[in-house]
Image: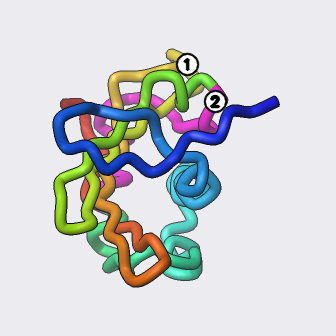
Amino acid sequence: MIQDIPVPYDSALQSPIPTIWRDTIVLIVEAFKDKDFARLNTIPDVQFIDLEYALELAESIVNYGAHLISLSKDAWDTSVCLYMQNDFWIAIIDLFTVEEGRSDLILDLRIFKKENQFEFQINGIYVP
Protein backbone atom coordinates (compact mmCIF):
# COMPACT_ATOMS: atom_id res chain seq x y z
CA MET A 1 0.00 0.00 0.00
CA ILE A 2 1.35 3.41 -0.99
CA GLN A 3 1.22 6.01 1.73
CA ASP A 4 -0.76 9.13 0.87
CA ILE A 5 1.52 12.15 1.40
CA PRO A 6 -0.55 15.30 2.03
CA VAL A 7 0.27 18.80 0.78
CA PRO A 8 2.29 20.50 3.55
CA TYR A 9 1.50 23.92 4.97
CA ASP A 10 4.34 24.23 7.51
CA SER A 11 6.96 26.70 6.29
CA ALA A 12 9.46 25.59 8.93
CA LEU A 13 9.97 22.05 7.60
CA GLN A 14 10.93 20.36 4.34
CA SER A 15 8.39 17.73 3.43
CA PRO A 16 8.14 14.77 1.05
CA ILE A 17 6.55 15.44 -2.34
CA PRO A 18 2.77 15.18 -1.97
CA THR A 19 1.13 12.23 -3.67
CA ILE A 20 -1.26 14.52 -5.59
CA TRP A 21 1.69 16.20 -7.41
CA ARG A 22 3.63 13.10 -8.41
CA ASP A 23 1.89 12.15 -11.68
CA THR A 24 2.45 15.65 -13.08
CA ILE A 25 6.11 15.62 -12.04
CA VAL A 26 6.59 12.25 -13.72
CA LEU A 27 5.13 13.67 -16.96
CA ILE A 28 7.49 16.67 -16.81
CA VAL A 29 10.53 14.43 -16.35
CA GLU A 30 9.37 12.11 -19.15
CA ALA A 31 9.13 15.06 -21.56
CA PHE A 32 12.71 16.08 -20.76
CA LYS A 33 13.91 12.47 -20.92
CA ASP A 34 12.32 12.05 -24.37
CA LYS A 35 13.52 15.51 -25.49
CA ASP A 36 9.91 16.25 -26.42
CA PHE A 37 9.80 19.82 -25.15
CA ALA A 38 6.58 20.73 -26.95
CA ARG A 39 4.88 18.06 -24.79
CA LEU A 40 5.63 20.19 -21.71
CA ASN A 41 2.99 22.67 -22.89
CA THR A 42 0.35 19.94 -23.15
CA ILE A 43 0.65 18.64 -19.59
CA PRO A 44 -2.38 19.75 -17.57
CA ASP A 45 -1.62 22.31 -14.84
CA VAL A 46 1.92 23.03 -16.07
CA GLN A 47 2.55 26.69 -16.87
CA PHE A 48 3.54 27.50 -20.43
CA ILE A 49 7.29 27.19 -20.94
CA ASP A 50 9.06 28.83 -23.84
CA LEU A 51 10.62 26.11 -25.99
CA GLU A 52 13.93 27.99 -26.15
CA TYR A 53 14.06 28.01 -22.36
CA ALA A 54 13.21 24.29 -22.27
CA LEU A 55 16.12 23.71 -24.67
CA GLU A 56 18.42 25.67 -22.33
CA LEU A 57 17.33 23.45 -19.45
CA ALA A 58 17.98 20.35 -21.55
CA GLU A 59 21.43 21.71 -22.36
CA SER A 60 22.18 21.54 -18.61
CA ILE A 61 21.60 17.81 -18.80
CA VAL A 62 23.83 17.48 -21.87
CA ASN A 63 26.57 19.52 -20.17
CA TYR A 64 26.29 17.29 -17.12
CA GLY A 65 27.24 14.43 -19.42
CA ALA A 66 24.46 11.98 -18.66
CA HIS A 67 21.15 10.74 -20.06
CA LEU A 68 17.93 11.12 -18.09
CA ILE A 69 15.82 8.10 -17.31
CA SER A 70 12.32 7.88 -15.89
CA LEU A 71 11.95 8.81 -12.25
CA SER A 72 12.61 5.90 -9.98
CA LYS A 73 10.19 5.30 -7.11
CA ASP A 74 13.26 6.07 -4.98
CA ALA A 75 13.00 9.70 -6.12
CA TRP A 76 10.14 10.18 -3.70
CA ASP A 77 12.39 9.15 -0.79
CA THR A 78 14.87 11.98 -1.39
CA SER A 79 12.94 14.73 -3.21
CA VAL A 80 11.47 17.47 -1.04
CA CYS A 81 9.23 20.49 -1.03
CA LEU A 82 8.99 23.55 1.17
CA TYR A 83 5.90 25.66 1.72
CA MET A 84 6.69 29.34 1.18
CA GLN A 85 3.30 30.68 2.29
CA ASN A 86 0.86 32.49 0.04
CA ASP A 87 -0.05 29.08 -1.41
CA PHE A 88 3.32 28.56 -3.09
CA TRP A 89 5.86 25.75 -2.70
CA ILE A 90 9.38 25.05 -3.90
CA ALA A 91 9.88 21.44 -4.98
CA ILE A 92 13.30 19.89 -5.55
CA ILE A 93 13.13 16.62 -7.47
CA ASP A 94 16.17 14.34 -7.65
CA LEU A 95 16.75 13.21 -11.23
CA PHE A 96 18.07 9.83 -12.35
CA THR A 97 20.41 9.01 -15.23
CA VAL A 98 21.47 5.94 -17.17
CA GLU A 99 25.03 6.43 -16.02
CA GLU A 100 24.52 7.02 -12.29
CA GLY A 101 21.05 6.12 -11.14
CA ARG A 102 20.32 9.00 -8.77
CA SER A 103 22.38 11.88 -10.09
CA ASP A 104 23.39 15.29 -8.77
CA LEU A 105 20.88 16.90 -11.14
CA ILE A 106 17.63 18.27 -9.76
CA LEU A 107 14.41 19.56 -11.26
CA ASP A 108 13.44 22.84 -9.57
CA LEU A 109 9.70 23.56 -9.58
CA ARG A 110 7.46 26.23 -8.12
CA ILE A 111 3.97 25.05 -7.37
CA PHE A 112 1.13 27.51 -6.89
CA LYS A 113 -2.32 26.88 -5.50
CA LYS A 114 -4.98 28.39 -7.73
CA GLU A 115 -8.43 27.87 -6.26
CA ASN A 116 -8.59 24.07 -5.80
CA GLN A 117 -5.84 23.19 -8.29
CA PHE A 118 -2.07 23.21 -8.28
CA GLU A 119 -0.13 24.89 -11.08
CA PHE A 120 3.45 23.82 -11.82
CA GLN A 121 6.16 26.22 -12.99
CA ILE A 122 9.40 24.70 -14.31
CA ASN A 123 12.26 26.82 -12.97
CA GLY A 124 15.36 24.85 -13.77
CA ILE A 125 17.37 21.68 -14.10
CA TYR A 126 20.81 21.96 -12.55
CA VAL A 127 23.32 20.71 -10.00
CA PRO A 128 22.79 22.69 -6.79
Label 1 belongs to which residue?
101
Residue 73 place in picture, x, y as percent: 65, 29
Residue 23 on the magenta segment: no
- Give residue 81's quadrant in the image: top left
How far apart, in angstroms, are the residues tagged by discs 2 and 1?
9 Å
The residue furthest front is: 10
The numbered mark at residue 87 is none
The kind of secondary structure element at disc 2 is loop
109 relative position to 95: left or right: left
- The answer to whether residue 75 shows anywhere in this view is yes
Residue 45 place in picture, x, y as percent: 50, 77
Q: Residue at x 53, y 29 (%)?
A: 75
Which numbered disc flags the more N-terminal residue, 2 or 1? 2
User: Residues in magenta?
Assistant: 56-73
Q: Residue at x 57, y 60 (%)?
A: 24
Q: Is residue 100 above or below residue 75?
A: above
Q: Amino acid at mark 2?
A: Ser
Q: Amino acid at mark 1?
A: Gly
